[in-house]
Image (cartoon, rainbow, N blue to C red):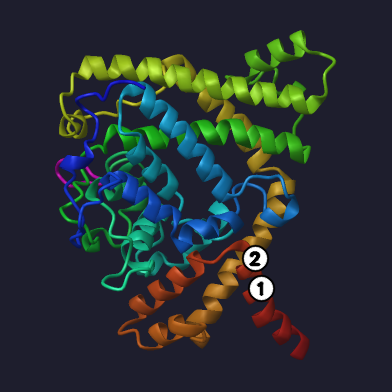
Amino acid sequence: MSERAPYASEPSQSRGRIHGASLSPTRSEYQRDRDRIIHSTAFRRLQHKTQVFLHHEGQHFRTRLTHTLEVSQMARSIARALGLDEDLAEAVALAHDLGHTPFGHAGERVMNEKMAEFGGFDHNMQAIRVVTRLENRYAGHDGLNLTWETLEGILKHNGPLVDREGRPVGRYLREGLPFGLDDISASEDLQLSTHASLEAQTAAIADDIAYNAHDIDDALRAGLIRLGDLVGVPLAGPIVRDVLSRWPDIERSRQAHEVQRRLITQSIEDVITTSNAAIAAAGPQSADDVRHAGRTLIQFSGEIADAEQGLKRFLFDNVYRSEAVMAPVRKSQAVVGELFDHYQTMLDLPGRWGNAVRAAASETQRARIICDFIAGMTDPYALEQHARLFDAARRLG
């Protein structure tokens, strides 16, 4: 195991939790965060939420849960090699998709459209709502009461939201800042203009690596592409050519797994080498130095970054926008949209959600409660509720 680096996040120096908690004699603060996330209801629901292929279309396609577990494993591996806190990297990785709606990004797009006049929808911000408000496992408070560092990582693992003058940056310059930033329950301000810890940056790049390798694997399983289609594709192409040359006669599934394994290994090793150099150049001596470094320090090399973008373009054109993926996407978008419209009109959400929405003080508050309810649904539950509400109405009609 690598020696802990001076710029690693130190659990004994955490900025703490909003609700006081006694120290654990057996676990660090970040280990406790990891465990709280794993035991949450929202984490279990990831098992039945879409990654790319709808969960019910095949038992071996990845779900949000299996994707999340793969990201957490890669994040730990990179963090270990760089001398970072593995538990914080894992906690951020395990929580990074807790705010996703049913049906993946398709559901998120619809929810953002429906919530446009009420502040919009952002899955990173929704994950913050999940861990600070919507999970209710504790007698004394709402939320999971996570440390400041884990909350910061969930919100900012992809980078700052604003510049030093408070102006939105990146995609937030185009889309506007997400709803609820001024109402986050944390022990201190989450510093929207700074970068997150190296552990959070590690979780973010592990997410990219997992997407690339595992979406290729699922697309091959689905028959959307063949290994031969990848021969000229950046990043994957050289690996595919070598595998097909060395083992031309073994079964296709073994060839595919060999390509996937090598792609992950190459990407992780590139990140470790490149990030070590970037960290050495920046010279941080503490986790706070990392936050104020002015740039992301966990990164691909320029060559791999360019190739990775080329691979993403190939997947976008040949997988994500293929009719085999888009046909169920259109159906799932209709399900989410019709559920939202129905609940906004009829206010007949089940259980405590119905009571909360009927007692809402404003239209905005009511819409946000409906949004929280739908965003928390699994794919099967959303389909079940849609069938219950609309199939009966169509039969009567």
Q: Specify the segment rendered in magenta.
A: 161-168
163 is higher (above) or lower (below) than 84: below
The percent position of residue 376, horizontal first and vertical second, equals 49, 65
Q: Quadrant of residue 353?
A: bottom left
Are the residues at dot 2 and dot 1 in contact (C-beta closer than 8 Å)? yes
The reply, left or right, for residue 387 in relation to residue 158 is right
Image quarter of the C terminus:
bottom right
Name the residue rendered at 82%, 19% in the picture: 250
Return the residue at label 2. 380
**Spatial distance from mark 2 to mark 1, Cα to Cα?**
6 Å
Disc 1 is placed on an element classified as helix
- Residue furthest to the right in view is 249
The percent position of residue 288, horizontal first and vertical second, equals 16, 34
The percent position of residue 342, horizontal first and vertical second, equals 55, 80
The front one of 166 and 298 is 298
Q: Quadrant of residue 363?
A: bottom left
Which dot marks residue 241? none
Name the residue rendered at 61%, 35% in the picture: 214
Give neighbour class at mark 2: few <14, some 14-19, many 20+ (Cα, 10 Å). some
Amino acid, disc 1: Glu
24 is higher (above) or lower (below) than 120: above
Which dot marks residue 384? 1
Residue 224, visible in the rendered structure:
no
The percent position of residue 260, horizontal first and vertical second, equals 63, 26
Name the residue rendered at 21%, 56% in the picture: 17
Does 163 appear in magenta?
Answer: yes
The reply, left or right, for residue 182 in relation to residue 314 is left
- Residue furthest to the bottom in view is 396
